[in-house]
Image (cartoon, grey):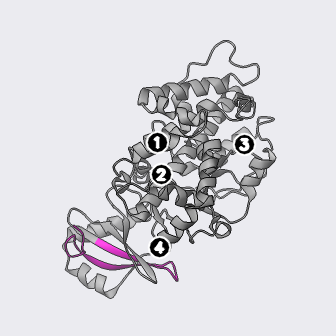
C-alpha cells in the first residue's frame, strides 16, 4: 500500500480531484486544541504535502504489528476522577451527548476529514469528551477498570472512522483507474433527507463491532461486542443497520456494493460494466484495514465542558533506553538466551510497541513516572520506566514473572 502522500501526488495529475469542504466540515478540520496523536506522514495540510521525514518501515518485523491494529500503547495521563466525571455526565451534558448520537450516530463522537480536501489537516478526529462519555455509559457495565474502558472506547470510535478512510482510499483507486474524479461526485450518494451515505455508515459501524473480536487480549473484555451492538441500535438510519453487515460474508458483500456505487458516480465511466477487479482489493490492506496510513488527531474539549483533565499519548516506539545500575547487575548474571532476548526486545521496541510477543503494557503509575512491562521469552520480564519530566526511558528491573510481580 502506498503512503497517502504518494497517492495525493498521483491524484494531483487528474483535474478536479481536490475540492473545498463544506463550511461545517472545514471548521472541524481546523479548530484549536488538537493534538496529533499519530501521523505516518508529516504534512503541511495544503494541497502539496512536504516530503515525509519519517515514513514507517514496512519491513517484515514491522508488519507483525499490523495484526495488532490499534494495539499501540496509550498513556492515559493522570488518573481520572470518576466521581467528578459521573457528576458531569449525569446531568445535562450526558443527555446532550446521547441526543447528538441519536441524531448523528458515532460521527457525533469523532469524524473523518478526507485527504481529497484542500486547506485542512486530513485524518481522523476524536474528541476527548467522547472517549470519556463512551467509557462511562456504553461500557460502564463491563468487568474492566476505567483505563481499559477508555482504551476500548477510543478504539471503538477509531474503528468506525477508519472505515471512512478506507472508503476514501477506495475512491482514490477508482480515480487512478478512470483518471476522473470519484470522491466528490460520490457525495451524490448521500441520502437527500439525512445528508449522509446510509450504506457507508452501516458498514463503518459494522467494522466497529467486528473489530471488537480482535486486538490485544486485554481489550477483549466479555460483552464488549454486545454493548457495541446495543450502542448502535439507538442511532439513526444507516448507522443502526450495522447488524445486517457484521458477518464476514455480509460485510464483504456490503463493501463490494459500496465500491460499485462509487464507480457509478464517475461521469461517463463504467457504462460498459465494472472492470474485472477484486473489489475488496480497492480497500487498504483487506481483510484488515491498516490504520497506520491515516493520521489520528485528538480534540481536547474537556476544559470548556468542565470534565476531568484527560490526555492521551501514543507510544509507537521506544528508543534510547538507558539501563540502571540495578538492571545491569542483574543482566550480567542472566544466561545468554535472556541477554539475547533483551537485545531483540530493544530492537523490536524501536520498530513498534505493538509487535506481538512483546506484550508491552503499563505496569505501575508513580507521581513522576510510569512503569511499563515487556516480555522476554517464556518466563522473564523487564520493567521500563518512562520519566514524565524528561520523557526518557530507563530499564529498571529484570527477572522472572514471579520476581517482577506478574502472575
Label 1 sits on a secondary structure element that is helix
CA gap, disc 4 and disc 1? 28 Å
Q: Which quarter of the picture shows residue 167?
A: top right
CA gap, disc 2 and disc 3? 33 Å
CA gap, disc 1 and disc 3? 33 Å
**Other-residue count near label 4 (Cα within 10 Å), few / some / many at <14 / 14–19 / ≥20:** few
Which region shows up in magenta?
382-407
**Other-residue count near label 2 (Cα within 10 Å), few / some / many at <14 / 14–19 / ≥20:** some
Label 3 sits on a secondary structure element that is loop
Instruction: Give the labeled residue for mark 2.
Output: 138
Q: Are marks 1 and 2 in contact (CB under 8 Å)?
A: yes
Question: Is residue 300 or residue 61 the one in the foreground?
Answer: 300
**Other-residue count near label 1 (Cα within 10 Å), few / some / many at <14 / 14–19 / ≥20:** few
Q: Looking at the picture, does residue 323 appear above or below residue 285?
A: below
- At horizontal 68% and vertical 51% (from top left) the residue drawn is 122
Q: Residue furthest bottom?
A: 325
Does the magenta segment cover residue 385?
yes
Instruction: Give the labeled residue for mark 4.
Output: 79
First-in-chain label (1 vs 2): 2
Label 2 sits on a secondary structure element that is loop
Eye-nearest disc, 1 or 3: 1
Does the magenta segment cover residue 224?
no
Q: Is residue 137 visible?
A: yes
Q: Which quarter of the picture shows residue 255?
A: top right
Residue 316, percent from left and from top: 49, 62
First-in-chain label (3 vs 4): 4
Amino acid at each position: 500500500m502506498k503512503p497517502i502522500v504518494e497517492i495525493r501526488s498521483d491524484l494531483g495529475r487528474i483535474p478536479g480531484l481536490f475540492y473545498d469542504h463544506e463550511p461545517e466540515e472545514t471548521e472541524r478540520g481546523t479548530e484549536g486544541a488538537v493534538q496529533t496523536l499519530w501521523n505516518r506522514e508529516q504534512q503541511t495540510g495544503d494541497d502539496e504535502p512536504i516530503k515525509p521525514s519519517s515514513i514507517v518501515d514496512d519491513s517484515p518485523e514491522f508488519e507483525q504489528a499490523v495484526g495488532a491494529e490499534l494495539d499501540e500503547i496509550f498513556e492515559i495521563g493522570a488518573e481520572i476522577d470518576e466521581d467528578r466525571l459521573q457528576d458531569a455526565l449525569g446531568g445535562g451534558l450526558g443527555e446532550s451527548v446521547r441526543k447528538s448520537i441519536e441524531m448523528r450516530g458515532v460521527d457525533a463522537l469523532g469524524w473523518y476529514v478526507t485527504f481529497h480536501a484542500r486547506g485542512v489537516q486530513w485524518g481522523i478526529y476524536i474528541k476527548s469528551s467522547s472517549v470519556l462519555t463512551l467509557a462511562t455509559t456504553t461500557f460502564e457495565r463491563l468487568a474492566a477498570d476505567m483505563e481499559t474502558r477508555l482504551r476500548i472506547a477510543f478504539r471503538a470510535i477509531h474503528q468506525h472512522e477508519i472505515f471512512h478512510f478506507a472508503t476514501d482510499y477506495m475512491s482514490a483507486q477508482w480515480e487512478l483507474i478512470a483518471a476522473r474524479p470519484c470522491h466528490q461526485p460520490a457525495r451524490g450518494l448521500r441520502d437527500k433527507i439525512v445528508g449522509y451515505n446510509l450504506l457507508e455508515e452501516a458498514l463503518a459501524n459494522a467494522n466497529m463491532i467486528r473489530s471488537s473480536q480482535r486486538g490485544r487480549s486485554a481489550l477483549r473484555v466479555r460483552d464488549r461486542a454486545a454493548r457495541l451492538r446495543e450502542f448502535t441500535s439507538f442511532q439513526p438510519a444507516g448507522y443502526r443497520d450495522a447488524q445486517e453487515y457484521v458477518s464476514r460474508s455480509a460485510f464483504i458483500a456490503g463493501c463490494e456494493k459500496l465500491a460499485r456505487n462509487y464507480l457509478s458516480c464517475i461521469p461517463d465511466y463504467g457504462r460498459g460494466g465494472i472492470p474485472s477487479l477484486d473489489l475488496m482489493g480497492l480497500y487498504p490492506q483487506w481483510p484488515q484495514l491498516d490504520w497506520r496510513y491515516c493520521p489520528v488527531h485528538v480534540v481536547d474539549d474537556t476544559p470548556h465542558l468542565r470534565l476531568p483533565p484527560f490526555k492521551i499519548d501514543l507510544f509507537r516506539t521506544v528508543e534510547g533506553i538507558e539501563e540502571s545500575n540495578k538492571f545491569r547487575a542483574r543482566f550480567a548474571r542472566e544466561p545468554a538466551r535472556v541477554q539475547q532476548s533483551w537485545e531483540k526486545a530493544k530492537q523490536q521496541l524501536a520498530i513498534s510497541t505493538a509487535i506481538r510477543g512483546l506484550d508491552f503494557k503499563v505496569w505501575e503509575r508513580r507521581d513522576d513516572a510510569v512503569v511499563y512491562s515487556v516480555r522476554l521469552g517464556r518466563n522473564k520480564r523487564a520493567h521500563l520506566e518512562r520519566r514524565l519530566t524528561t520523557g526518557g526511558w530507563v530499564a529498571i528491573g529484570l527477572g522472572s514473572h514471579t520476581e517482577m510481580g506478574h502472575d
